[in-house]
Image (cartoon, rainbow, N blue to C red):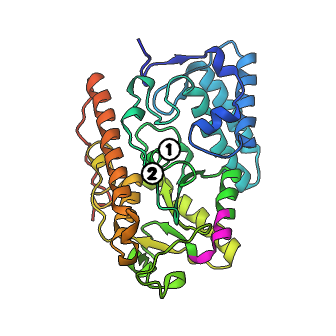
């Protein structure tokens, strides 16, 4: 019988193998294997060789379990406390989160859909081409990496990693790739979807009535090698403020401006995932639903109606239905409740 996400998974021969480029990129990235993650993995493997306790994983996120977890916690807490620079501390934290998830989910999760092998939904997803003049960036917190109910992963499953790129928070190689792409596109071609209460974000309609799009009426619009970049902050609401702050600091370093260009969605409703995955309030939604919202609102811009953006939005919404069904069926099989737990904080 296939192992469950809640059962302990003992160390296997494959757990001790190095993370190859093929394996690393199989999880949804096009980058080389990052140095900080490799270093943490080697530290964990070295500790396992010197320890009498078995290296076991289990639960959500493939977390370390048992006596070995206590030993690993003690060692890496000591390393973390010895780091003086706050930036290096943050990079170490992110690398450790990602390293444990990589080791803990080897052979357990499907690399494409991040679901347990017995729940793989890949065959049910329908791929779709994203309009070449826009690109999504999934700026993902490491605690959401390989999370089974994460929805951001759907975007590169549907559109491909060149159209929907993964950028892991705190992994400098990933962040450098993303910011290099922003510089190539230009300041006016980068927008962040984030509910910033301290400013008045632009709408999608506002965006296409100003900047590089002014004067474009009904003629065909093809930005070619300089796409419009939409950044989706993919993490829990409690983690998103730190992610937004890091983006804002990098924006200021890159372009000398403190204001981070944010957009809001006027037609956004509750995602189907809201039935299963708790959100702080009904007016907040998951990452994939936000991407679908952007595509729907772009479709409503008259000059963009010819690019089939509504079909691309529908492809994302259909993928959300598939993911929800896979998660619900797993819970039913495990005898768990499928009723969403209400959370009343921040609901005003």
Nearer-N-terminus badge (2/1): 1
Q: Which residue is depicted at the point 52% across and 66% down?
A: 133
Circles 2 and 1, Cβ within 8 Å, touching? The answer is yes
For disc 2, the marked residue is: 236
Q: Is residue 75 magenta?
A: no
Label 2 to label 1, Cα distance in Å?
A: 8 Å
Q: In this view, does 304 lie above or below 9?
A: below
Q: Is residue 183 magenta?
A: yes
Q: In this view, does 290 lie to the left or right of 214?
A: left
Q: Which residue lies furthest to the left in this view?
A: 339
Q: In which quarter of the image is the C terminus?
A: bottom left
Quarter assignment of residue 338:
top left
Quarter assignment of residue 253:
bottom right
Q: Is mark 2 on a helix, strand or loop?
A: loop
Q: Quadrant of the N terminus?
A: top left
For disc 1, the marked residue is: 144
Q: Is residue 324 above or below residue 174?
A: above
Q: Give the range drawn in magenta.
A: 181-188
Task: From the top left corner, tell me how far across and down residue 328 is, in percent.
Answer: 28, 33
Task: From the top left corner, tell me how far across and down residue 43 is, in percent.
Answer: 74, 30
Task: From the top left corner, tell me how far across and down residue 64 is, in percent.
Answer: 57, 26
Q: What element carries label 1?
A: helix
Q: Is residue 275 above or below residue 131?
A: above
Q: Which secondary structure type mostly characterizes the magenta part of the structure?
A: helix
Q: In this view, does 17 lie above or below 178?
A: above
């Amino acid at each position: 019988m296939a192992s469950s996400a809640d059962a302990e998974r003992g160390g296997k021969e494959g757990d001790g193998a190095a993370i190859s480029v093929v394996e690393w990129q199989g999880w949804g990235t096009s980058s080389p294997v990052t140095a900080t993650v490799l270093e943490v993995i080697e530290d964990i493997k070295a500790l396992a060789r010197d320890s009498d306790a078995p290296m076991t994983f289990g639960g959500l996120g493939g977390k370390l379990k048992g006596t070995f977890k206590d030993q690993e916690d003690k060692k890496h807490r000591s390393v973390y406390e010895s780091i003086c620079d706050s930036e290096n501390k943050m990079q170490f934290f992110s690398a450790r989160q990602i390293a444990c998830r990589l080791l803990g989910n080897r052979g357990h999760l499907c690399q494409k859909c991040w679901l347990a092998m017995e729940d793989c939904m890949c065959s049910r997803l329908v791929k779709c081409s994203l309009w070449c003049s826009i690109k999504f960036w999934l700026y993902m917190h490491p605690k959401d990496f390989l999370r089974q109910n994460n929805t951001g992963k759907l975007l590169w499953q549907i559109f491909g990693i060149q159209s929907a790129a993964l950028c892991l928070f705190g992994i400098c190689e990933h962040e450098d790739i993303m910011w290099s792409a922003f510089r190539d596109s230009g300041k006016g071609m980068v927008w962040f979807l984030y509910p910033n209460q301290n400013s008045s974000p632009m709408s999608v309609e506002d965006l296409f009535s100003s900047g590089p799009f002014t004067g474009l009426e009904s003629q065909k619009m093809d930005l070619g090698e300089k796409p419009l970049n939409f950044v989706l902050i993919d993490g829990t609401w409690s983690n998103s403020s730190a992610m937004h702050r890091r983006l804002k600091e990098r924006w200021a370093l890159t372009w000398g401006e403190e204001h981070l260009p944010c957009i809001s969605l006027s037609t956004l409703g509750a995602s189907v995932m809201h039935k299963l995955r708790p959100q702080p309030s009904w007016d907040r939604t998951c990452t994939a639903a936000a991407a679908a919202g952007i595509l729907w609102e772009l479709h409503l811009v008259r000059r963009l109606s010819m690019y089939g953006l509504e079909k691309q939005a529908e492809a994302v919404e259909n993928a959300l239905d598939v993911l929800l069904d896979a998660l619900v069926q797993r819970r039913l099989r495990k005898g768990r409740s499928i009723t969403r737990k209400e959370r009343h904080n921040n609901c005003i």
